[in-house]
Image (spheres, helix red, strand yellow):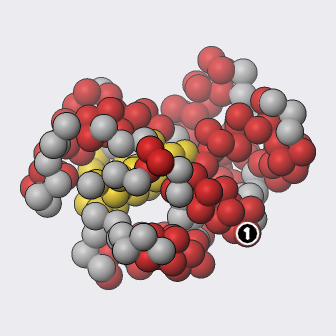
Amino acid sequence: MTRLLIVGPPGAGKGTQAAIIAETFGIPAISTGDIFRANIKDGTELGMKIQEIVSSGSYVPDSLTNEIVRDRLHQDDASEGFLLDGYPRTVDQVHELDSILAETGAELDAVVRLVADPDEVVARLLKRASEQGRADDTEDVIRHRQDVYQDQTEPVIAAYAERGLVIDVDGLGPVGEVAARVRDALAARGIAVTV
């Protein structure tokens, strides 16, 4: 069983690397952002609430996110492991994740932190916004998200670093090279591919 978390500033390539890690280890990649976007696209009540929040560059409240994650981690495909992307974002969510995992006697194996230069990330996100027509990804909103990430999420990384779970990986460069760095860093921690 492999239970991982991937973190890094918005636009550092978490989604791309999460998909590769999930396929490599045969575990589901659970992205709160994907769940939120699907609800927005489907026009659900939840989606309309989320759209209003993300349009302002803010994060979805913990209570709502915790409920979605708890439900997702209790689904059958996550029983043998998972990769979380976009959660936890706050220290309160770290404690909530601990309690969700404790319900099944589980805990995280590692936290992969993608490290990337902020200006490079902003340029990457502006390019993605124009390619994918993401109206919410303006430069002001992107920079605001970087600041919010720094303020709110750095304490999460510190909490996991205290437990010795954080593995730093350079997130810049070709996708395959970053994926190889991630795989090698996990293997060095004894988390090798078993699928």
Q: Quadrant of the N terminus?
A: bottom left
Position of residue 111 relative to residue 27, above or below, is below
Q: Which residue is mark 1?
A: 63
**Horizontal and vertical percent for residue 180?**
19, 36
Residue 164 seen by the camera: yes
Question: For the image shown, how many numbered marks are present on the structure?
Answer: 1
Name of the residue lying farthest toward the front: 76
Q: Quadrant of residue 126?
A: top right
**Horizontal and vertical percent for residue 59?**
71, 58
Q: Quadrant of the C terminus?
A: top left
**Horizontal and vertical percent for residue 2?**
28, 54
Viewer-proximal residue, 106 or 160?
Answer: 106
Residue at position x 29%, y 62% in the image: 110
- Dot 1 surroundings within 10 Å: few (below 14), some, or many (20 or more)? few
Q: Left of 163 or right of it: where is 77?
A: right
Residue at position x 36%, y 42% in the image: 27
Tell me the kind of residue under disc 1: Ser
**Horizontal and vertical percent for residue 72?**
57, 52
